Image (tube, helix red, strand yellow):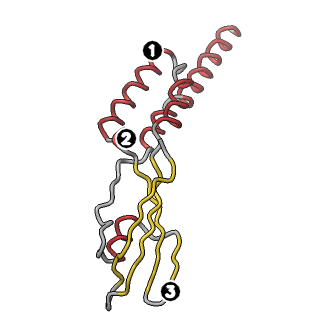
Amino acid sequence: MKRRIVRIALVLSLAVIAVVASGCAQVMVVRQPSPFSPTTLEVGERRSVISGEIGPPVATETGENRLTDTYNYVDGGPKNHWASKIARVLMYTAGDFFTLFLTQVVWLPMESMGFKGTTHSVVVDYENGGDYWRAEKIENNEVHGN
């Protein structure tokens, strides 16, 4: 009777560990940034429109009738398209099922290093257009990524 209780406790412990450990790579897939290419980065575009698409600037410098904003955004690229994400989740789940989650040793580093997005830094010089600020010069630089 005592052996049976020990076996049941061991099996339950292993089952809990397997459930807790499973899905880490799958969660990372879902959290990867989606593809993003801003459409409002055009000379002459209003500041409010650019900020509305990219988000608030991380830095702003003001001058006489001039304004310079620096924005950051992350482009997930085609490797993080929804179809690619679904395929990876299915592959990771199948690997976990057939190897009792041992494939997480491969999936986790692969997902964290190979599929993160590319960070861009955008510097926009604005000119006062009367009622609003309009973009005069735009520099979109890739900061880092893969």
- Within 10 Å of the Cα at label 3, are there few (<14), some (14-19), or many (20+) other Cα atoms? few
- Residue 95 sits in which quadrant? top left
> Three-letter amino acid code at disc 1?
Phe
Dot 3 and dot 2 residues touching (CB under 8 Å): no
Looking at the rendering, in which quadrant would you find the N terminus?
Answer: top right
Marks 1/2: CA–CA distance? 25 Å
- Say if 126 sits above or below 129 in the image: above
Going from N to C along the chain, the mark reached first, 3 or 2, is 3
Q: Dot 3 corresponds to which residue?
A: 63
- Image coords of residue 134 (percent x, y): 33, 80
Question: 27 or 136, which is in the foreground?
Answer: 136
- Image coords of residue 119 (percent x, y): 47, 52
Marks 3/2: CA–CA distance? 40 Å
Q: Dot 1 corresponds to which residue?
A: 98
Q: In the rendered view, does 87 fall on the left or right side of 2?
A: left
> Three-letter amino acid code at disc 2?
Asn
- Within 10 Å of the Cα at label 1, are there few (<14), some (14-19), or many (20+) other Cα atoms? few
Dot 1 and dot 3 residues touching (CB under 8 Å): no
- Image coords of residue 112 (percent x, y): 52, 37
Q: Dot 2 corresponds to which residue?
A: 80
Residue shown at the point (41%, 60%) measured from the top left: 140
Q: How many marks?
A: 3
- Within 10 Å of the Cα at label 2, are there few (<14), some (14-19), or many (20+) other Cα atoms? many
Dot 1 lies on which element? Answer: helix
Marks 1/3: CA–CA distance? 62 Å
Q: In the rendered view, does 27 fall on the left or right side of 53?
A: right
Disc number lying in front (1 or 2) = 2
- Residue 43 sits in which quadrant? bottom left
- Image coords of residue 14 (percent x, y): 60, 20
Residue shown at the point (30%, 66%) measured from the top left: 40
